[in-house]
Image (cartoon, helix red, strand yellow):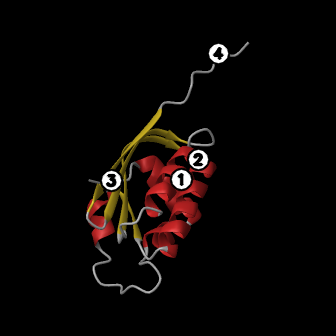
């Protein structure tokens, strides 16, 4: 019999005026990605409008294809409300997945209907 340990995954959510900041720690995978997506979507539905959603991955240890799918869904939802998604402090495991799938620019590009000024800020926070 295989003794599998439960996936270590936590996140914390903080709101600032116009910005949602979510710190992600542990493994973002099949077992955990729904929790992250649900939390972000719940905050997007709040009355106060958001212009930025910042996902801080400084403590991310693993990401699988379901985790990437969660990021794509979060992007879809943030774009639908006119907010911009930022993937901050990306560890190598996330960088590798984003490079292999060629979705970094898609995920962090400006929300529909916004200008493209200041686009470099994602790179400034990327590796923190």
Mark 2 vs 1: CB contact within 8 A:
yes
The image quarter in which residue 18 lies: bottom left
Q: Give the position of the N terminus as an image quadrant.
A: top right
What separation in Å lies between label 3 and label 2 (alpha carbons)?
21 Å
Residue at numbered disc 2: 34
Disc 3 crowd rating (10 Å Cα; few below 14, some 14-19, many 20+) is: many
**Residue wearing tag 3:** 89
Within-10-Å neighbours for mark 2: few <14, some 14–19, many 20+: some
Above or below: residue 9 compared with residue 55: above
In this view, the residue in front, 122 or 40, is: 40
Q: Is residue 11 left or right of residue 65?
A: left
Q: In this view, does 51 lie above or below 25?
A: below
Tell me the mark number nearer the camera, choosing from 4 and 1.
1
Q: Which of marks 4 and 1 is nearer the N terminus?
A: 4
Kindly report which numbered mark, 1 or 3, lies closer to the viewer in this rendering.
1
For mark 1, what is the residue?
37
Q: Are marks 3 and 4 in contact (CB under 8 Å)?
A: no
Q: Mark 4 points at which residue?
A: 3
């Amino acid at each position: 019999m295989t003794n599998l340990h439960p996936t270590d995954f936590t996140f914390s959510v903080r709101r600032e005026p116009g910005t949602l900041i979510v710190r992600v720690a542990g493994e973002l995978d099949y077992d955990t990605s729904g929790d992250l997506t649900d939390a972000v979507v719940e905050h997007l539905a709040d009355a106060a409008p958001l212009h930025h959603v910042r996902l801080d991955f400084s403590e991310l240890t693993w990401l699988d294809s379901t985790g990437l799918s969660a990021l794509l869904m979060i992007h879809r939802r943030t774009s639908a409300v006119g907010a911009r998604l930022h993937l901050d402090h990306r560890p190598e495991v996330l960088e590798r997945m984003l490079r292999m799938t060629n979705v970094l620019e898609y995920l962090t590009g400006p929300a529909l209907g916004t200008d493209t000024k200041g686009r470099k800020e994602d790179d400034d926070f990327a590796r923190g």
